[in-house]
Image: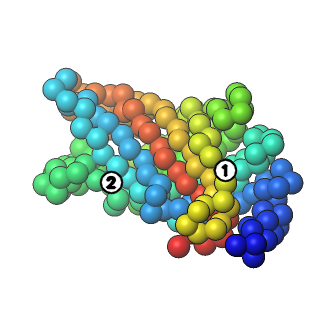
Amino acid sequence: MARIGLIVLSLLLTTGLARGEPVTYTFVTKLSRVMFTVDHSGFSSPFGIMKLAPGRFVFDEKDWSKSSVTVSLPTRTLDMGDELWNKQIRGDESWEKLFKATDIVFRSTRLERKDETHGTLYGDLTLAGVTRPVALDLHLNKIAVNHFSSLPWIGFSATTTISRSQFGLGAYGPYIGDDIPMRIEVEGAVGDPK
């Protein structure tokens, strides 16, 4: 047990976590998701999910302004939870611009800290070939050593709402809501999260 403690301490010291320096994390893609809802004529708000592509991000616990992230969401991972609906969306010319691009990409421009665990993440979202600025309400859930992997670990939740018509995806406007609320859950690890 003492040996594990020494390994964890050495990991913390070599990664910068213990010194309050910027740390590079690898996305834990099996646990990270983007969820969104779509208003369906007022009857319901079905949700879909997208997966994150492998990648890395930098977070500085002491000075959030030194943090940065680029996230790619492969459009092929878009899943509305029903095989038939997924096929209909992909075969509909109205959504062709969405699936023509291989990825939806968010690139941060700055992160402003509000308190110990909350901030606003600003950046540019490229969706269906259109880039627009967006702001996400960010919550730092936890920074600690993961019990299962013994690696330094971090978790965030974020929310935002985008207007699909601003990205040229305004089809079926009277029947499908324009505002798309989104929730992002991200975990990151120092090293290979496997």
Residue at numbered disc 2: 78
Q: Position of residue 75 (x, y in %)?
A: 37, 56
Furthest residue toward front: 1
Q: Position of residue 93 (x, y in %)?
A: 21, 49
Question: Which numbered disc covers residue 3?
Answer: none
Q: Amino acid at mark 1?
A: Ile
From the image, which quarter does the N terminus lie in? bottom right
Residue at numbered disc 1: 143
SS at badge 1: strand
Residue 7 visible, this orientation:
no
Q: Nearer the viewer, mark 1 or mark 2?
A: 1
In the image, taking residue 76 as reference, residue 130 lies left or right, namely right
SS at badge 2: loop
Furthest residue toward right: 19
Crowding around mark 1 (Cα neighbors within 10 Å: few <14, some 14 to 19, many 20+) is some
Residue ID at (66%, 59%): 145
Q: Position of residue 152 (x, y in %)?
A: 68, 61
Residue ID at (67%, 54%): 144
